[in-house]
Image (cartoon, rainbow, N blue to C red):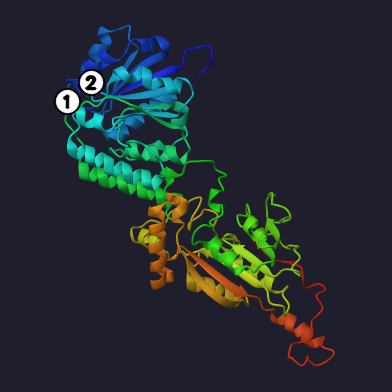
Amino acid sequence: MTPNSRPRLLIFVIAYQAEATLTAVLERIPRPVFADWDTEVLVVDDASADRTYEIGRAYRDAHPELPLVVLRNAYNQGYGGNQKVGYTYAIAKGFDVVAMVHGDGQYAPEELPRLLEPLRDGEADAVFGSRMMPPSGALKGGMPLYKFVGNRILTTFQNAVLGTDLSEFHSGYRLYRVATLKALPYQLNSNDFHFDTEIILQLVNAGARILELPIPTYYGDEISRVNGLAYAWNVAWATLQNAAHQAGILYQRRFDVGPTNDVSHYTAKLDYASSHTFALESVPAKARVLDLGAGPGPLAEALLAKGCSLTLVDQAVREAPAPAKVLVRDLNDDPLDIELQDIDVILLLDVVEHLKDPERFLAALRRHFDYRTRTVVLTTPNVAFIIQRLMLLFGQFNYGKAGILDRTHTRLFTFRSFVQLLRDAGLRIRRVRGVPAPFPKALGDNFLARTALAINQALILLSKSLFAYQIFVEAETTPDVAFVLADTVGQKRPPGRDGAPNQPSTEGTNRLTSGHR
């Protein structure tokens, strides 16, 4: 919106079988809106079988002073599909705000000036007219009791899953900043009635500012075309799919909204059973820790709090809390120059699956170990997780930007294949654990998330391979045969009384000179 001109507003009248109500709806649009905004009215008839389109055109011809465009879809697009048409028009024509009004008159056009104010003042990205503010208003306005109850149940469920506090998710009175719509993949949403839920999920994922304002409820003689049970199922399923997407469990392209360099999935998960809490438990106090492929170093502060000395290694420069050190290395480079002489614990948390050649990297890592045992802690996604199995059952195998099928993953492992990889690399396995899905991260730290987490942990006791979201391994190092031979050839005296070999020279053996990430 330019400061010295009126902002451009599109009033989008979504219409289907609205021949009895369309004229009245157009008459009820407050005329002061046309003075305050550079306004156009768009009627999109969704292939109605009645005279909706003809009536819209007749009204346009009778009111040449009104900037009115009347369109008709040749084929019925559905409630959601018709919204896509209107929003795409708003984007293509360069409007600042689009306000959707229903052609059946259920939502009062008279409320437009008040609903537009927060958008004009830059206080919101989306404004919803709520019939549940206060809740008693909906029933007084004629909302059937079964619809009221269903609305409350679904809204309560969705707020719990999303961590939001909306009074209702199911109002059709909606106004959007067009720039906000342009950033959403709304074209991927359903053409059915739960389009409204899916676009809210996208707004929430994008961090958009949603504002609700009370509106009067009106139920007249209009015909409801919503199958209540099917709608409720679609709404609940879409909400759960979004939660699974946010947790990295099940990628959903339509909910992939946000910055392309988002690293939120690398944030610390320390308040519940997770790969991070398991790893932290495996690191002794005051240990000397090397975190390979540390990313943003989600465990750094917790490790420093345990008195550990810490070195973070990653291919991009990262800030680290003092006194941790940062080494900029690409673990796929060869050679890779990293000191290992003073290291007690090596962390490889969600790293191995990103390597171009994990076998070669681990073999190269082993060549620089001596008889002193180091602890190696590794995690990787479990590709045999039940969600992935079910998706395969239904023919789905979709990569995303986070989760088990992260686009940057080059290798996928089961418990058995991961343990075999590590044994082949000469690591002695101390402990293998199944990590539950990060429900608190997806759902918020609430009762629902904690309950899901507890159920997941119980199921892992029955079958790690089926119910673990990630694989956790704690192992210890052994030197390779080349080191043993070199040490044996270089022996000048028998082993000591304890049977341990003499300490070999560490010269030339404490650097990674060949390796991969």
2 vs 394, nearest the viewer = 2
Secondary structure found at label 1: loop
In the picture, the quarter occupied by the C terminus is bottom right
Residues under labels 2 and 1: Cα distance? 22 Å
Q: Nearer the viewer, mark 2 or mark 1?
A: 1
- Image side of residue 339 versus residue 459, left or right: right
Query: Outermost residue toward the left?
Result: 221
326 vs 90, nearest the viewer = 326
Q: Is residue 360 above or below residue 112?
A: below
Within-10-Å neighbours for mark 1: few <14, some 14–19, many 20+: few
Between disc 2 and disc 1, whose residue precedes?
2
359 vs 22, nearest the viewer = 22
Q: Residue at x 58, y 72 (%)?
A: 474
Residue 91's x, y, as percent? 43, 26
- Image side of residue 479 versus residue 439, left or right: right
Residue 378 in sight from this viewpoint: yes
Is label 2 in contact with label 1 (beta carbons under 8 Å)?
no
Residue 449's x, y, as percent? 41, 54
Residue kind at label 1, given as amino acid type: Gly
From the image, tell me which residue sits under label 1.
220
Q: Residue at x 40, y 24 (%)?
A: 90
From the image, tell me which residue sits under label 2.
53
Within-10-Å neighbours for mark 2: few <14, some 14–19, many 20+: many
Q: Is residue 409 above or below residue 192?
A: below
Residue 94 in sight from this viewpoint: no
440 vs 471, nearest the viewer = 440
Q: Is residue 137 above or below residue 441?
A: above
The quadrant where residue 392 appears: bottom left
Q: Residue at x 56, y 73 (%)?
A: 421
What label sits on residue 115 in the rendered view?
none
Residue 31's x, y, as percent? 33, 10
